[in-house]
Amino acid sequence: MTIAKNQRSSLLTDVKAGPGVIPIDYDGSMRLIKPGAMIYIDDGTIALKALAAAKDSVKTEGHNARTVKKHKGINIPGVNLESGIPTRIGRISRSEWKQELAT
């Protein structure tokens, strides 16, 4: 799917791609994403601006024109999305993490 600048699209959980739909693999609530938040896909090569969010979707507007490829990461700076899988870093304190990095 190609996103054009100012094109409206939606990030949806557990659906297949279609016109204006970018499927994502995420089980938590999308409501944590507030209007105006920037959403970056594929190491920031694709930028979307959040317009509105519901439990399982986010309406967005393209900030630049790019093709969305399969299996690319999504980053949303300033938004701490829920995760059902705690990682080791998620279970240890910041000071423990810094100590591990130093070794």
Image (tube, helix red, strand yellow):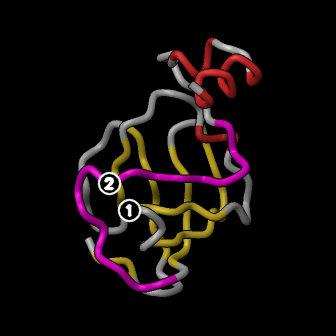
The vertical placement of 72 against 80, above or below, is below
Main secondary structure along the magenta-highlighted residues? loop
Mark drawn on residue 72 = 2
> Given contact means CB atoms under 8 Å apart, are the residues at marks 1 and 2 in contact?
yes
Give the side of residue 62 with respect to residue 15, left or right.
Answer: right
- Which residue occupies the foreground of this view, 43 or 59? 43
Residue 79 lies, in percent from the top left, at 69, 45
Residue located 48% across and 87% down the image: 5
Instruction: Find numbered disc 1 in the image and state the secondary structure of the residue it sits on.
Output: loop
- Which residue occupies the foreground of this view, 38 or 18? 38
Q: Residues within 10 Å of mark 2 (few under 14, many from 20)?
A: few
Residue located 56% across and 61% down the image: 39
- Which residue occupies the foreground of this view, 36 or 73? 73
Magenta region, residue range? 64-80
Dividing the image into 4 quarters, which one contains the N terminus?
Answer: bottom left
Residue 4 lies, in percent from the top left, at 41, 85
Residue 74 colored magenta?
Answer: yes
Residue located 59% across and 30% down the image: 101
Q: Which residue is mark 1?
A: 42
Marks 1 and 2, Cα distance to the nearest angstrom? 5 Å
